[in-house]
Amino acid sequence: MQLTSNDIRQKYIAYFVKRGHKQIPGSSLVPENDPSVLFTTAGMHPLVPYLLGQPHPEGKRLVNYQKVFRTDDIGEVGDNFHHTFLEMLGNWSLGDYFKKESIPWSYDFLIKELNLNPDRLYVTCFVGDSDAPKDEESARIWQSLGIPTERIYFLPKKDNWWGPAGQTGPCGPDSEMFFDVTGKPCSPDCRPGCGCGRFSEVWNNVFMEYNKTADGKYTKLSQPNVDTGMGVERILAVVNGFTDNYQTELWQPAIAKISALCANSYKDNQRAFRIIADHIRASTFIISDAIEPSNKERGYVLRRLIRRAIMQMRRLAIDPVEAGIVQISNIFVFIMSPVYPELVVNKQKISQVLKEEVLRFNKTLDHGLKEFNKLQKIDGKVAFDLFQTFGFPWELTAELAAEKGQPVNQEEFKNEFEKHQDLSRTASAGMFKGGLADHSEVVTKYHSATHLLHAALRNVLGKHVHQEGSNITNERLRFDFSHPTKLTQEEVKKVENMVNELIKKDLPRNVESMTYQEALDSGALAFFKGRYPEKVTVYSFGDFSREICGGPHVESAGKIGQLKIYKTEKIATGTQRIYVNIGK
């Protein structure tokens, strides 16, 4: 009997709850107060403060399923197992159990709960380097469970080290579990992780003993943690005997819809079908978490996903694209909403954003074609300019250039593209400093400033104001909030003065642990609905500000320093953004 994705989620949660873990809700794809990454990239990401030693209100053993998005995998989508958006099952020990409990539980779950054949299970462990020793302990535990030495591989950091999720933070050696799905080695040197398709990674146990600092050093954490991750899409395929993730019930309804829309088969168009399905599913979730297409940061990633899907749909002659993309998105809403009910709530918004982006891209393509027809010479640099300005993928430019009798050197295009990526990475490294893992004094001040700023905005503008996101670095605070119009200079001054008066009064900070409902009843603000565990931490500054939050915070408002709002802007319909500096 085949298992469904829901079977696996339920089995996983029940298994670890039985072993003393508390189930906690998943978080948004948009990280809270963390500028080190654009999206939530792993189940551990929202837990960084607790992995660093801050007590979690639900205790030391946690379990959940978490939606994640990884930009690194956009270019890899099209094969049988890569995805941009995926679900991650995870269990954590925050300074409680370690390898001798974690590894046997993983083995037991895979073999007894999911009925995988133990003779086809392979594992990898960290080989050691100047930052951390060889992980002999994990290997010994695997051997004690019956995994022979010839199925245990020691690999370097690029293979067997996980984290940090951003530029800095908790990380450590890991032990990864692979299932031999084909039994067919590609060569005598075939091993887990070689990429030939024989092995599928099914689980990863990270032993977080280290904290990577901003200067690239690895220091010991105050507590050793366990962070595990199992991708739902991949384990579902393995359990049901598929070598192609897109054969499972998570994807097949959408694959069937694409086939009907283009009157072509999945077998003959696998790469195109996979890109369309993956990118539309990812876009559906990203839009549901209040991101819209733009030319910056998260919005740019979303725009890129939608446009890559559109190009594949055009190639398959799906017409009209705007109707097709919405139909495919609606299928994912139907499949995933029992687990993620926010998809139903945001269904109309998702459809509207997708339609508008299709129409916008069509206009861009039409304009780009006019510009293309004016070109006298088409080389790799021109091909990249067309890609960057008009969204022309390489294949479209090459095809149009061939019609003009001008073959284009693809290596030139690749070189230009790589230069662009290098520049983007450099810019990101500067933009996304700090983050949840940065508990420096100045970041802590900015984190506390968000609470006073939030309360002041509600006092000046009205109770309809609520936080929609924040981005904190060592240099500034960026705060997004709901409000229909851009702030006037008078409103800016009122908010600024109110916060500075509170700082001057040196309001004391108070911290309490209570149930989520008790927190709401006590007047605490909680605007990230559906993302809180049963027990929460509430931070207050006097009687002025009271919010559910994970910290960290200064001991009293006076330690924040003088606050200055230096810029305001409208970033979307009904959403404003302000930029803040704090002085000494």
Image (cartoon, rainbow, N blue to C red):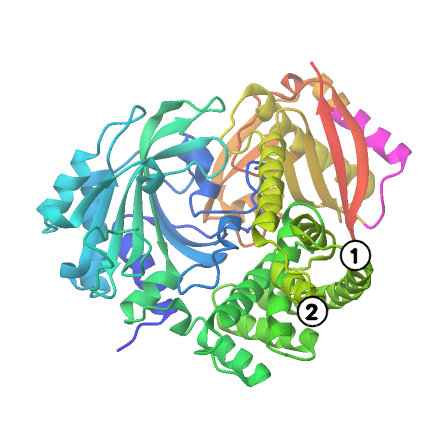
Left/right placement of residue 155 relative to residue 517 reads: left
Looking at the image, the residue that sits furthest to the front is 405
From the viewer's side, name the closer residue of 562 and 332.
Answer: 332
Looking at the image, the residue that sits furthest to the top is 584
- Magenta region, main secondary structure: helix
Residue 285 sits above or below residue 53 on the image: below
Disc 1 element? loop
> x, y percentage for residue 350?
66, 65
> Which residue: 53% across, 32% down?
551
Left/right placement of residue 537 relative to residue 245 reads: right
Residue 33 shows in this picture: no
From the viewer's side, name the closer residue of 514 and 413.
Answer: 413
Residue 192 falls within the magenta-colored stretch: no
From the viewer's side, name the closer residue of 177 and 21.
Answer: 177
Please give the residue where the numbered disc 2 appears in the rendered image.
403
> x, y percentage for residue 152?
17, 46
Q: Which mark is residue 275?
A: none
> Which residue: 55% across, 51% down?
29
Residue 485 falls within the magenta-colored stretch: yes
Span of residues in magenta: 484-499
Q: Earlier in the sequence, mark 2 or mark 1?
A: 1
Q: CA distance from mark 2 to mark 1?
A: 13 Å
Please give the residue where the numbered disc 1 appears in the rendered image.
376
